[in-house]
Amino acid sequence: MISADAIRGYIDLIVLTLLRQRPSYAYELAKTITTVADGQYTIKQTTLYSALKRLETTGLVASYSDTSDSGKPRTYYRLTTSGSNHLTAKLAEWEDTKNLIDRFAGNMEPFNDSPRTCEYHSTQPDQGAS
């Protein structure tokens, strides 16, 4: 199970990604998140509603009233153009983040007890050189 703390920063990304596919309402989004997460994460309704309101306030999603397939009135959310642009940027950032974490998690040799030195080589020209 993934903790709420571990996934907190990615709720907006998850919601925007789902809304990229089609407009949806909160209950349907929560069901989809639970299904896709396959038992690893269940979103709380308060977390989802807070994310939707935050995304709406920032103009990344817009809400509208409509009737669901079952005939119930629902508040639907759709991705705005700004939201789509934001999502594209955030997905690229996610790939960079994932690649960085993967480098640390899987490809680093374990440290041993011997002292190590680390050198930093800047690609910038030396400011003191004339």
Image (cartoon, rainbow, N blue to C red):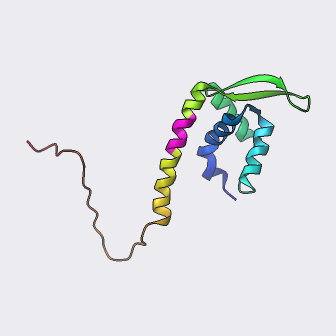
Direction from residue 41 to residue 82 in the image, left or right = left
The furthest residue to the right: 71
Which one is in front, 52 or 89?
Answer: 89
Q: Residue at x 62, y 49 (%)?
A: 7
The furthest residue to the front: 21
Q: Is residue 95 above or below residue 84?
A: below
Q: Quadrant of residue 118?
A: bottom left
Q: Residue at x 55, y 30 (%)?
A: 85
Residue 23 within the magenta-colored segment of the rendering:
no
Residue stretch rendered in magenta on the structure: 87-93
Q: Position of residue 90 (x, y in %)?
A: 53, 39
Direction from residue 22 to residue 112 in the image, left or right = left
Majority secondary structure of the magenta segment?
helix
Q: Position of residue 86 (x, y in %)?
A: 55, 33
Direction from residue 97 to residue 4 in the image, left or right = right
Quadrant (top left/top right/bottom left/bottom right) for the N terminus: bottom right
Quadrant (top left/top right/bottom left/bottom right) for the C terminus: top left
Residue 91 within the magenta-colored segment of the rendering:
yes
